[in-house]
Amino acid sequence: EAANAFLKSLEEPPPRNLFILLSSHPSQLLPTILSRCQRIPFAILSREFLEELLKKHHSFEPEEAVLAAGLAEGSMAKALALDKEFNSGERRDFLLSLPGLNEAPQNAALALELAANLKGKGEKIPIFLDLLRTWFRDLLFLREVKCEGKEIINGDLLPTLNQHLAPLFTEDIYQ
């Protein structure tokens, strides 16, 4: 019913109006709606540009902007959500202090234990799972690409990442 009402608005728009329809799942829209739209794909924002926007327009401190821009991976919405729920890196620091973090990629039981520790603390599991994903992505990226740290999401923790890197990959678990 709502889609049909929207379709009517698209077919007979009010004067001097422009509709911008954003969807992460365009396949779920009615074909009649899609046929009346022009598709314009949006690219992710660069980390540097996102940092500047956060500082200028959203009152982020410089270190908070760097952290949020890295973890948001090009998404302004994600960066702003991190600001509300992330508490300036305190949750990431808590996560990185959990025992067994280094062994989690090789031991599924330890990974589940990490998740249980988070749940027991009443924390929001999706945020922490995303943090874990970025942490292990950075470790693997440092190992395989041997980059300078510019591409690292948790770039502010590069020395810590390098400390965790050596014991984590003493044997090749991916072969």
Image: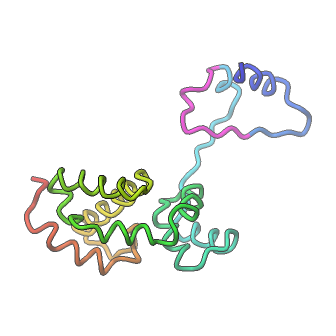
Q: How is the image coloured?
A: rainbow
Specify the segment rendered in magenta: 20-31
In this view of the protein, which residue sits in the foreground, 112 or 143? Answer: 112
Q: Provide residue 76's location: percent of width, then percent of height.
A: 59, 58
Tell whether 136 sits left or right of 127: left
In this view of the protein, which residue sits in the foreground, 89 or 52? Answer: 89
- Looking at the image, which residue is at 36% across and 53% down? 119
Asked whether residue 129 is drawn in magenta, I would say no
Tell whether 130 sits left or right of 80: left
Q: Is residue 59 above or below residue 46?
A: below
Asked whether residue 28 is drawn in magenta, I would say yes
Q: Is residue 122 above or below residue 152?
A: above
Q: Is residue 156 above or below residue 26?
A: below
Q: Quadrant of the N terminus?
A: top right
In this view of the protein, which residue sits in the foreground, 144 or 173? Answer: 173
Quarter-of-image position of residue 106: bottom left
Q: Provide residue 141's location: percent of width, then percent of height.
A: 28, 64
Q: Provide residue 167's location: percent of width, then percent of height.
A: 14, 72
- Looking at the image, which residue is at 64% across and 40% down? 22
- Looking at the image, which residue is at 57% across and 31% down? 26
Q: Main secondary structure of the magenta part?
A: loop
Quarter-of-image position of residue 139: bottom left
Tell whether 106 sits left or right of 71: left
- Looking at the image, which residue is at 55% across and 52% down? 43
Q: Provide residue 48's location: percent of width, then percent of height.
A: 54, 71
Q: How many marks?
A: 0
